[in-house]
Amino acid sequence: MTTEDVVTTSVAFDEMSVDDYAALLAVGSDREADGQEFWDARASDYNDAQDRDDGVLADGVVTHLVSRGILDDAHVLDIGAGAGRYALRLAPHATHLHLVDISGRMLTHARANTAAVGLANLEFTCVGWNDADLDALGWRGAFDVVFASMVPAVRSRAGIDRMIAASRSWCVVNRTIQMRDTLAERLRRD
């Protein structure tokens, strides 16, 4: 797979309601936990997987944002930053990148991974997205881009509303959504 193979879809909110978008993001969310203990237990595995990843998806997403000037001089909030998969690609294009994750262990990996390549325009906060006090943290309307990739916390209307509240310009959600074609499946069976 190459960067050109990554399909990126931009949907304007005027084409779809926030509730419709939240319902689309919620697909499959019943299979995922979102607690600190759950993610702390998986942090090393996620970091190892990131080391083995070819980066095509993450590179494609960031290339899409860069080509549209969305990251130019931007202060970015990366929700559910994990071990830094996107931070490694976003930080070189942004003025400042703030990583937030519910897992302290994930952020420990993110700190090490970003430091290893000399990135210095970063901040880290360990808090669950839906528990974060935007006002106390100074995050309400503080970011040009609020970014989330594959994050259970933004698969609800409340999570999306919080993204909108933290953004002064862009909200970007990267999510793989599996669409099923039941007719094709039936034809393959028969």
Image (cartoon, helix red, strand yellow):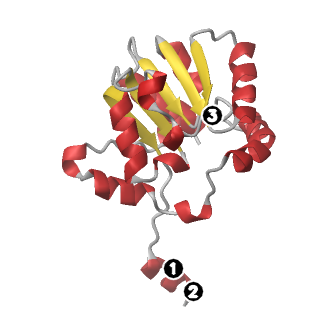
Q: Nearer the viewer, mark 3 or mark 2?
A: 3
Q: Residues within 10 Å of mark 2 (few under 14, many from 20)?
A: few
Secondary structure beneath dot 1 equals helix
Q: Dot 1 corresponds to which residue?
A: 185
Q: Are marks 2 and 1 in contact (CB under 8 Å)?
A: yes
Q: Dot 3 corresponds to which residue?
A: 55
Q: Judge from the rendering whether residue 16 lies leftward or rightward of residue 71; answer left or right.
A: left
Q: Judge from the rendering whether residue 166 lies leftward or rightward of residue 110; answer left or right.
A: left
Image quarter (top left, top right, bottom left or bottom right) of the C terminus: bottom right
In the image, farthest residue toward the left:
14
Residue 161 image label: none
Cα distance, mark 3 to mark 2?
34 Å
Secondary structure beneath dot 3 equals loop
Question: Which amino acid is tagged 2?
Answer: Arg
Cα distance, mark 2 to mark 1?
6 Å
Residue 151 is at least partly visible in this image:
yes
Question: Which amino acid is tagged 1?
Answer: Glu
Q: Which picture quadrant has residue 181?
A: bottom left
